[in-house]
């Protein structure tokens, strides 16, 4: 008996592609369009892109390290071969010791061990994998208001609801975090709360560092409400800018309070303090989170670039990494100082204007009078482009919290790429545009 294959009628319209829920909810980051605008117009001073300083990229440091690796047959074979999913053991030992040193602690009392380190393709991959292994659709993540918008947008694509907690000059306000969790508990929603996301050093977008006192408070709040919820709420500490501290001593990580290594997933990167092109991040995770993260990562790439890990490992062992961090601190400190001085010169006379005063990182947060709409649709954005300066509208930086409406009078200023004279001129142009809008 012959089977006849039925023929569907041919149409001239393409059939829809059955995208996943995550793909349907993924949105292009608005910063991409801003970067394109800057590239298309070389005369435009961009205070928008969160890229690192081109002049400080460590080419002269990395070149001899690569030569050393490739000139030693056994080292070349080890670096050019596949590695383990979590990263090779000696490198993870270095990373663990690096975290211990940053917290000025003792290895025998520090949370976790090198076995709890996982190396990833940038810290962004680790952040996304943690979301993947912890979140189901309609779960809740708590973040700052504002927060790192690339990640909070990804959380929304995963189907999570993001609830936001206000910041002040000391970072996330602990009492407001407690109040939000108390309200979710009263509403019977605690089973949905999976993690609290905090950028703990020189936050993107505000430049604010979470104070030492708040770190302990937030850790204790998360631990308390975990007991009430009946499951651990992970405290996801994003410390991408930790090494880029220019003034004073950076406080100990939130992770340092997690003595039993149960609650805090500490994520760091070499993109900001060394070279983003090496695309290497890492995390110190609660022990029972390590295996789910490894399984998810293994299904993606079988492990990050082994060669890049060997480069960074040698840079750390030789002291070249620490030396380069010193170079970056001096370069970026000058840029932050230039930004703050230019803001003082050009904005101090405008009523209702304020800005953060970061002690590290790449960002300054500018707040204008409520009457000034800084969104791309508002008059200021167009005036600024005509004046020859580009900024990130602050409205992009607020999570999609269904209970809140983001303000439209804030701006993120990024100082990584522009040179000192461009920063000064860019701030002057922005002030001129603001004065035009205010009349």
Image (cartoon, rainbow, N blue to C red):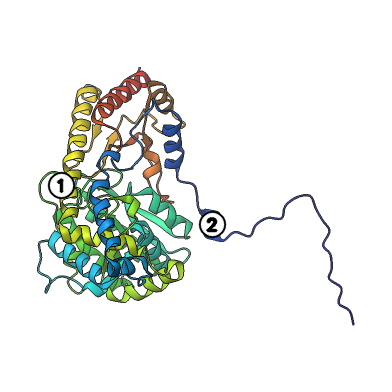
Which quadrant is the C terminus positioned in?
Answer: top left
Q: Residue at x 45, y 71 (%)?
A: 299
Q: Residue at x 57, y 61 (%)?
A: 20
Which quadrant is the N terminus positioned in?
Answer: bottom right
* SS of the residue under disc 2: helix
Q: Residue at x 20, y 23 (%)?
A: 345
Q: Which residue is mark 2?
A: 23
| Label 1 packing within 10 angstroms: few (<14), some (14-19), many (20+) | some
Percent of width and height locating residue 417: 30, 37
> Looking at the image, is 164 positioned above or below residue 191?
above
* SS of the residue under disc 1: helix
Q: Earlier in the sequence, mark 2 or mark 1?
A: 2
Percent of width and height locating residue 140: 40, 62
Marker count (numbered): 2
Residues at discs 2 and 1 in contact (Cβ within 8 Å): no
| Nearest the eye: 173 or 33 | 33
User: Is residue 165 among the parts visible in the rendering?
Assistant: no
Quadrant in the picture for residue 9: bottom right
Whether residue 135 sits left or right of residue 352 in the image: it is right
User: Is residue 347 among the parts visible in the rendering?
Assistant: yes
Whether residue 295 sits left or right of residue 91 in the image: it is right
- The tag on residue 326 is 1
Percent of width and height locating residue 214: 18, 55
> Looking at the image, is 63 positioned above or below residue 283?
above
| Label 2 packing within 10 angstroms: few (<14), some (14-19), many (20+) | few
Percent of width and height locating residue 288: 31, 76
Q: CA distance from mark 2 to mark 1?
A: 41 Å
Q: Residue at x 37, y 37 (%)?
A: 392
| Nearest the eye: 365 or 115 | 115
| Nearest the eye: 393 or 296 | 296
């Amino acid at each position: 008996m012959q089977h006849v294959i039925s023929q569907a009628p041919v149409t001239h319209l393409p059939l829809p592609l059955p995208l996943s829920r995550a793909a349907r909810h993924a949105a292009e980051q608005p910063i991409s369009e801003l970067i394109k605008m800057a590239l298309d117009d070389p005369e435009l001073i961009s205070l928008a892109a969160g890229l690192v300083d081109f002049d400080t990229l460590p080419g002269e440091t990395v070149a001899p390290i690569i030569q050393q690796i490739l000139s030693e047959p056994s080292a070349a074979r080890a670096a050019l071969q596949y590695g383990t999913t979590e990263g090779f053991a000696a490198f993870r030992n270095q990373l663990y010791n690096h975290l211990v040193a940053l917290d000025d602690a003792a290895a025998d009392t520090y949370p976790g061990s090198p076995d709890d380190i996982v190396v990833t393709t940038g810290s962004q991959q680790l952040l996304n994998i943690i979301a993947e292994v912890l979140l189901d659709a309609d779960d809740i993540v708590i973040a700052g208001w504002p927060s790192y918008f690339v990640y909070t947008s990804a959380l929304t694509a995963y189907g999570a609801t993001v609830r936001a907690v206000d910041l002040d000059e000391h970072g996330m306000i602990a009492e407001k975090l407690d109040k939000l969790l108390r309200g979710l508990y009263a509403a019977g929603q605690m089973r949905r709360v999976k993690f609290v996301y905090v950028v703990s050093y020189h936050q993107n977008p505000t430049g604010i560092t979470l104070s030492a006192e708040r770190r302990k408070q937030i850790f204790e709040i998360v631990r308390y409400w975990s007991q009430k919820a009946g499951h651990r709420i992970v405290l996801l500490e994003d410390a991408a800018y930790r090494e880029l501290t220019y003034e004073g001593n950076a406080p100990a990580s939130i992770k340092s309070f997690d003595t039993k290594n149960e609650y805090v997933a500490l994520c760091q990167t070499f993109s900001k303090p060394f070279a983003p092109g090496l695309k290497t991040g890492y995390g110190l995770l609660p022990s029972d989170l390590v295996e789910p993260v490894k399984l998810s990562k293994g299904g993606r790439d079988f492990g990050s670039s082994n060669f890049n890990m060997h480069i960074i490992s040698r840079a750390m062992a030789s002291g070249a990494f620490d030396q380069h961090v010193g170079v970056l601190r001096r370069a970026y400190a000058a840029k932050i100082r230039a930004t703050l001085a230019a803001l003082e010169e050009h904005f101090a006379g405008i009523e209702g204007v304020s800005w953060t005063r970061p002690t590290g990182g790449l960002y300054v947060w500018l707040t204008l009078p409520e009457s000034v709409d800084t969104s791309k649709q508002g008059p200021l954005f167009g005036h600024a482009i005509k004046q020859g300066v580009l900024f990130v509208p602050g409205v992009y930086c607020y999570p999609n919290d269904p209970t809140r409406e983001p303000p439209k009078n804030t701006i993120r200023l990024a100082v990584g790429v522009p040179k000192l004279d461009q920063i000064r001129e860019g701030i002057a142009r922005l002030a001129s545009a603001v004065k035009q809008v205010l009349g």
